[in-house]
Image: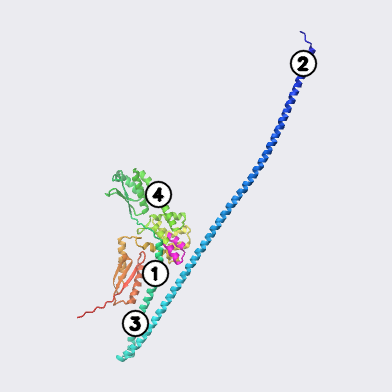
Amino acid sequence: MNINPAVVFLLALAACLVGVAVTYLVVTAQSKTRAVEVSTALAEAERRSAQADTSIETRHKELQIEAREQVQREVALLRETIEKETADRRQEIKEGEQRLRERESQMERRAKNLDARDKAIEAQEAEAKKHLQEAQLTVQTSRDEQKRELERVARLPVAEAREILLQRVEEEVREEMSRVARRIEESVREDAERNARKVLALAIQRCAVDQTAETAVSVVPLPSDELKGRIIGREGRNIRTFEQLSGCDLIIDDTPEAVVVSCFEPMRREIARLALVNLVNDGRIHPARIEDMLNKARLDVQQRMREAADKATAEAHVRLSKPLLEVFGRLLYRTSYGQNILKHSVEVSGIAASIAAEIGADAQLCKRAGLLHDIGKALDQEHEGTHIELGEELLRRNREPEPVIRAAMEHHMDIGAMTSLEAVIVQIADAISSSRPGARRENVETYIKRLQNLERIGDSFQGVEKTFAIQAGREVRIIVKPDQLDDLLSLRLARDVAQRIQEEMTYPGEIKVTVIREMRSVEYAR
């Protein structure tokens, strides 16, 4: 079949035109669809942008409201804190004013008491002068009468009669003056002792501290006697190692189920005791284990000392620096005549503060100085020097105030005379705590030697018949010869004996000197 090329061309051209038309229609349709989609997307984007703007504005307003509320809450909290601090400060000021008023009231009462006492003393002095004038008048009258009587009866010369009268008048006036002086002195002493007893009794009552006495040995109980051999070890290596590392002696004798730890130094003895108790409980006893247990016991003892120091300072209401606190804790294992020095320091602090509050001194200064007065005893076994010198150096190194150092270190009067009332109060509180019944104990030799010295001093004075030391050495009674000493000389003898005891002896508390003069008239009926 023959196909005309022109027809084929036309058909092809028509097909192309149809394809172009179809393509144009398809492209046009797609363009319209895309335009619709773009417009829809733009509308959606605008809608979402509007929603975002609205959401942002809403969130911004919410954040502004939250920030405003937060600022209001902080302002309210700050206002509440400021009001609370202001109220606390007002309360402190009010309490300070109240304490100041109480102190002024106490000072006024003390001033009134002193005025009343001065008036009483002036009245006593006036009465004494009146009695003396009356006695002088009586003596003058008696002298005139005796003069006339002597001239009349004996017909003696005037000069000789005058000598006799003057002798008798001198004796009478001397006796009368002695009686008046003794009466005034006893009255003043009774008033002073009564007031002193009140102050001291109140101070001791406020400070009722239990004291414990330490010994030079500690006993460690054992579950059985079999452990004694393990403690000794093969050829004694365990006990040798223990004694070398601890510095204590172990006494293993026939005492059933017990071992004695002996050492004069309480801290080392306590470390050794704790280590031995731990070894017995653990059951493994050999040189390496002994060293470990001793190190652990040292740490335990150091912890105990820190806790004891914290407890003591809290009880005394005194704050110490950390270096002072560490040294102060060592006093837990220091004793003096069996009295624990840590508890003694707390007791002295309380007594000194009570006395200072009663007589108007600085109670806080006395409390701090009383607590630190024996702190040098924590160092005197490791360093050269007295506990006064070591304590003063330690306090100065830790920048304690000068009044506290002086009041604390003058309690034994080893660095000169006392420079303040607080130093006197600390010395009195130390004497009270040391000399009260049950506070201290001393060995028999020292006790007997002190009694012998008291009796020796009393017997050394002329006119003394016998001296007796009684009341465990707290009182000396002296029997005098009545024909050699009169009442006035007996009073002077008591003062001289007391002064000599103060100069020559060292003793806790005070010693009472009593002079007894007894006059006996004996006659026989035959």
Q: Amino acid at mark 3?
A: Glu
Q: Is residue 131 magenta?
A: no
Q: Nearer the viewer, mark 3 or mark 1?
A: 1
Q: Of callouts 3 and 2, which one flags the residue occurring earlier in the amino acid sequence?
A: 2
Query: Is there CB contact under 8 Å for labels 3 and 1?
Result: no
Q: Quick one: label 3, few (<14), some, or many (20+) residues within 10 Å?
A: some
In the figure, 34 relative to 408: above or below? Answer: above
Distance between mark 3 and mark 1 Cα atoms: 33 Å
Spatial separation of the CA atoms under disc 1 and disc 4: 49 Å
Q: Which residue is mark 3?
A: 172
**Mark seen at residue 12:** 2
The residue under label 1 is 194
Left or right: 494 as drawn, with respect to 46: left
Of label 4 and label 3, which has the lower sequence position?
A: 3
Instruction: State which region is magenta.
Output: 351-371
Residue 40, percent from left and from top: 71, 32
Tag shown at residue 419: none
Q: Which mark is residue 300?
A: 4
Q: Quadrant of residue 479?
A: bottom left
Local crowd size for mark 2, using a 10 Å CA cut-off: few (<14), some (14–19), many (≥20)? few
